[in-house]
Image (cartoon, helix red, strand yellow):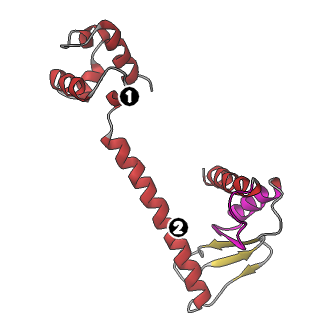
């Protein structure tokens, strides 16, 4: 949900400024059109942030670079800069960098999820037990299909630990 994510991020960011952490920017670039700009304005109004220039950057109907529509403070103040404008190029670079930063963060989080095992969160299951369990069952899928009694039959696994493992694997 773009709007909810934007609301949360802006609320978190500008609440810190209201609490004295950081400095109020001169301008806030919003990646998106009228809807995103309205959401940003709503958050700033909720937090009673003093007059802050908002600039919405919306891709044109063809979604090609150079055809962006800019909204200054609200949807009523729409402007289009020429495709060769240095100001538009700067705005595009800022937008592209924010996309790169967000995508890198999402990929890192996804990668971390792939590299970590659900078993790592179970108290009493360290690297050695994890390895032995996966070897005993032949992998995480097979371990997930096992009952508490079957898990408890694995070497070094008590009934109580088997219950914890089963609960961790079936928490969703």
Disc ID at residue 98: 2
Residue 99 x/y as whole percent: 50, 66
Q: Taking 52 as reference, is 81 above or below it? A: below
Q: Taking 72 as reference, is 48 above or below it? A: above
Residue 46 x/y as whole percent: 81, 53
Q: Quadrant of the C terminus?
A: top left
Residue 149 x/y as whole percent: 28, 7
Q: Is residue 45 visible?
A: yes
Say what secondary structure mark 2 lies in: helix
Residue interval drawn in magenta: 20-45
Residue located at (70% from left, 54% from top): 16
Q: Residues within 10 Å of mark 2 (few under 14, many from 20)?
A: few
Quadrant of res 122:
top left
Does 35 lie within the magenta span?
yes
Disc ID at residue 121: 1
Judged left or right of residue 139, residue 30 is right
Q: Residues within 10 Å of mark 1 (few under 14, many from 20)?
A: few
Mark 1 touches mark 2? (CB < 8 Å) = no
Judged left or right of residue 73, residue 166 is left
Quadrant of res 29:
bottom right
Q: Earlier in the sequence, mark 1 or mark 2?
A: 2
Does 112 lie within the magenta span?
no
Judged left or right of residue 151, residue 65 is right
Residue located at (73% from left, 66% from top): 24
Q: Taking 4 as reference, is 170 above or below it? A: above
Say what secondary structure mark 1 lies in: helix
Judged left or right of residue 148, residue 133 is left
Residue located at (45% from left, 60% from top): 103
């Amino acid at each position: 949900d773009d709007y909810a994510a934007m609301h949360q991020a802006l609320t978190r960011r500008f609440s810190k400024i209201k609490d004295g952490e950081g400095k109020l920017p001169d301008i806030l670039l919003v990646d998106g059109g009228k809807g995103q700009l309205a959401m940003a304005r709503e958050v700033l109004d909720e937090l009673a942030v003093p007059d802050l220039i908002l600039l919405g950057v919306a891709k044109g109907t063809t979604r090609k670079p150079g055809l962006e529509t800019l909204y200054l403070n609200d949807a009523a103040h729409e402007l289009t800069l020429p495709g060769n404008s240095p100001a538009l190029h700067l705005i595009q670079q800022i937008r592209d960098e924010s996309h790169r930063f967000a995508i890198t963060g999402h990929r890192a989080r996804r990668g971390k999820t792939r590299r970590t095992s659900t078993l790592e969160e179970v108290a009493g299951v360290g690297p050695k037990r994890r390895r032995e369990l996966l070897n005993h069952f032949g992998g995480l899928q097979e371990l997930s299909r096992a009952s508490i009694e079957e898990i408890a039959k694995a070497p070094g696994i008590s009934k109580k630990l088997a219950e914890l493992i089963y609960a961790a694997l079936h928490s969703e």
